[in-house]
Amino acid sequence: MSDKSHRGTIFVEDAKVLEIRHYPGEQFIMRVAAPKCAAKAMPGSFVHIRCDDTLPMRRPLSIMRANPTEGWIEMLYKIVGGGLRSLSHKKPGDMTNLVGPIGQPFIPSHQRPYTLLLGGGVGIPPMIFLAEHLKDDSRDWQPMAFMGSEIPFPFAAQNSVLPCSWAPTDVTAANPLLEEWKIPSRLATLSGFAGCFNGYVTDLARLWLQNQPTKVIRQVEIFACGPTPMLRAAAALAKEFDVACQVSLEEFMACAVGGCAGCAVEVMTEQGPAMKRVCVDGPVFEATSVFG
């Protein structure tokens, strides 16, 4: 894909911090006013944000929500270095600068309305964005979301009132936003958090798949974002049940707009293996093209 294909869809935009919320595990949700980005953002796209005026390198952050009417976007991030620590010090009214929205989004198929959304750790935001996108679509989607974390979740989990007859009776913890949107969700962890499934998020997904009739399985598509081992497990799960699967890759990035090719990964294409840039050729790829 030519870099020129992205002209007019990626913006450099000054953004005012509207709100920043702190969660355990040094996790933050930041809402910024960025109307150009909000108007074009799609589930799976991300921004490259300036953390501090003294730091030349930006950081890529997935978009968790976007409101084109009010002109804001939200991002979830966890402090993993000095740049994101600087970003966490921002306050409402402070300014930053971002480049976005960047990347190829998740594209649900109308032939597979049973959408299984898997988010692990900082891979949770695109799943929330995709869930909201499906909720607002007039078509009859049937989303189910599973989220996993080994540190406290970046939200206050609540006991679900939405029925999940296939799940163990003690697995009740759900994402509050999805609960509000009437989208069933369940949480998975190995850290013993109350109400969560004891295992990996892909183990929870397998349990769901095992309890679905064949006619549903034929209409399932998995969407996943998280650490590479989780994505590999999601791809294997999709292969096991013969369902479609899209994954969003995580890679270190320098420019994030396709110029440096520092985020390139090997992807299988119809012409054979090729190096693709995660930033603009992805971050979303068909799972079979990446993991076989």
Image (spheres, rainbow, N blue to C red):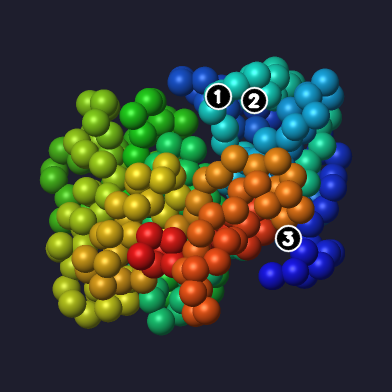
Up-down relation of residue 125 to residue 79 (above or below): below
Residue 78 location (% of width, % of height): 54, 28
| Quadrant containing the C terminus in the rendered view | bottom left
Left or right of 138? Residue 186 is left
Residue type (three-letter) at the residue carrying disc 2: Leu
Q: Are marks 3 and 1 in contact (CB under 8 Å)?
A: no
Disc 2, SS: helix
Up-down relation of residue 135 to residue 16 (above or below): below
Q: Mark 2 — residue?
A: 84
Residue at left offset 21%, top offset 39%: 199
Mark 2 or 3 closer to N-term? 3
Q: Mark 3 — residue?
A: 40
Up-down relation of residue 75 to residue 8 (above or below): above
| Quadrant containing the N terminus in the rendered view | bottom right
For residue 148, the mark is: none
Residue type (three-letter) at the residue carrying disc 3: Lys
Residue at left offset 50%, top offset 54%: 248
Left or right of 196? Residue 33 is right
Mark 3 or 1 closer to N-term? 3
Residue 95 location (% of width, % of height): 83, 29
Up-down relation of residue 106 to residue 37 (above or below): below
Label 3 to label 1: alpha-carbon separation: 28 Å
Label 2 to label 3: alpha-carbon separation: 24 Å
Residue 278 visible to an observer of this rendering: yes
Q: Nearer the viewer, residue 115 or 53?
A: 53
Q: Mark 1 — residue?
A: 80
